[in-house]
Structures are given as C-alpha cells and as structure tokens.
Amino acid sequence: MRARYGVPLGVTAVGAAGLVYAAGIEPRSFRLRRVTVPVLPSGMRPLRVLQVSDIHMVGGQRKKQRWLRSLAGLRPDFVINTGDNLSDPEGVPEVLDALGPLMEFPGAYVFGSNDYYGPRPRNPARYLLEKVQGRHGLNGNPPVVGAIHNPWEDLRDGFDAAGWQNLTNTRGTLKIEGVSVELTGLDDPHIKRDRYTEVSGGPSPTADFSMGVVHAPYLRVLDAYTADGYPLILAGHTHGGQLCIPFYGALVTNCDLDTDRVKGLSTHTSDGHTAHLHVSAGCGANRYTPFRFACPPEATLLTLVGRES
C-alpha cells in the first residue's frame, strides 16, 4: 500500500511546495543586481544608474514598497524607470509613495502597456502556449471590450511634478555634475505605440553620452537604436521569463527577443553597429499570475565606465 501511494503523494507534495514557493516566497525575495557596463567615452567619470522596472503594484504590497523606498540609499546619479508600474487601477498613490525617495534624484521614465490598461484574468497555460508560438502583445489592435483604463495620467503627473523626464517618443537630457546625458525614449512597442521616426537620427553631437530607453525590447526597436549608434539600451517587460527552469533558463520572453537575452546584460548588433543591452527582470508580476520561479524580482544598479580599448 505504501509503495502504491507513496510516489504519487511525494510528487504531489513536491508540486505543492513548489507552488507555495513560486507564489509566496520568491516573488517577495527582492534583490539588487550590480552590473558594470563599458560604454562611456574615455576620460568621463563613471555614472551610476538605477533601473527599476515592472513594479506591477497591487494595493497592500508593503514589503515591495519598503524595498523600493530603501533603494534611495544607493544614491545613484540618476534613475531610469522602464515601465509597467501598475497592476491595479488603485495603485498609483502607492507607486508614487514607494518611489518618492528615488524621485529626489534625477530620473526619466517610459510607460508599458500595464500602465495604460489593467490586466485581465487569463489561463497561465494558454499564456505560455501563445508566447511559445510567437504571439506577442495586442499587435497594435485596440484594447478588448471591457479593458480597464488605468489612471496613467495621474502617474505621469506625479513623475513630472518630481522632475522626472517623460521619454514617450521623445528625447530628454539630464545634467549630472556637468555631464550631459541624452536619453532617447519610446512608448511601448508591445502595443505598437513606439514611433521611432519621431526620435531617429542618432545621438546628439552636443551630448557627453547618449542611451536608448524603452519598455519592451522588440527587435525592431533594438535594431533602430543600434543602427543609429546608441551605445546602451535599457528595457524591461520580460520579467526575466518569470517562470524559469533551473540550469536551463526562460521558456518565453513575451516579445520577439531570444530567451538567451531575456534578462541582464548582453549585446545587440545591427547595420554594422553593436550596442550594450540591459533587460531588467523587474520586481513584480501581473496580479493574476503572481508567480516567479528561478527568477527573483530585482532592480539593477548599472555602473557605466569608460569603453574598453
């Protein structure tokens, strides 16, 4: 009798433990990654950039809010927010409160689709199947009937009031102790709101350093930034795969980027140019799929240094 039922019960117990871990432990195991990126012109002092992404704030997420507030202790030179701050139409005040200490530093932001529209319940298995099949995003179509309008305007107004620059299909410049940092941003390619023609032309010759900022790292955007000569691109959106297999990695990226570059620092080549690409795994998840496995929530402190000779 023990032999007959022991194995199934053991498998069930392991599965239940894995589900508890993926839903209740890892999503709250916030961590900071540190990355050094050799992209600055020779002789320029290093720049410390804090990237936060994919917060997906839901009311009551106190530990996440405390952790985000604590990041101000890093005292970065500037902050880049690569979008998807919301997963709850009521979450704007909590996002602004959590990011309040960071908004004391220079910064800039782009939005993702979840800033504009609230999530809907979906079958996780269907979601994974669609991504494996290469079906990405809303493909430029209007939101489905009944889509929840998130109060992104309030979020924008809060960021703007703090002095963060809105990079929605536009350029901005930060002055960091006499250093001119040009930021070229796009609206979210995941729902085809990106308009690269409005910002094309490459880095400004008057800037000391230039970089691209976007929520979802779709190849068309990476190609355009890289071909235009930007040495660094920051993105989020992928959640690092969210549910990964240990010693294998991510199954999906939720865009057309390959899984080898689903998170962290890599490179991208287009039209004879090569750029560094950093994709944040983000620190949240859709409220209806609040799971993470082998892919803990994160923010990244990037230290930009002189290019290698």
Image: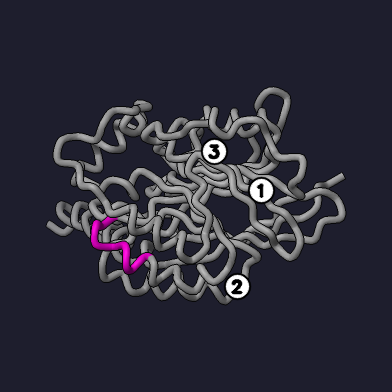
- Callout 3: 10 Å neighbours few (<14), some, many (20+)? few
Residue hosting label 2:
74
- Callout 2: 10 Å neighbours few (<14), some, many (20+)? few
Secondary structure state at the residue bearing disc 3: helix
| Dot in front, 3 or 1 | 1
Which quadrant of the structure image shows residue 45?
bottom right
Residue hosting label 3:
260
Where residue 297 sits: x, y (%)? Answer: 44, 60
Q: Amino acid at mark 3?
A: Asp
Which quadrant does the N terminus fall into? bottom left
Residue at the (76%, 40%) spot, across then down:
205
Q: Amino acid at mark 2?
A: Leu
| Dot in front, 3 or 2 | 2
Where residue 143 sits: x, y (%)? Answer: 24, 35
Going from N to C along the chain, the mark reached first, 3 or 1, is 1
Q: Which one is in front, 218 or 179?
A: 179
Going from N to C along the chain, the mark reached first, 1 or 2, is 2
Residue 123 badge:
none
Query: Would you say the residues marked 3 and 2 are in contact, meaning their CB atoms lie under 8 Å apart?
Result: no
Residue hosting label 1:
182
Question: With 201 as the anchor, is 41 left or right in this view?
Answer: right
Q: Which one is in front, 8 or 309?
A: 309
Going from N to C along the chain, the mark reached first, 3 or 2, is 2
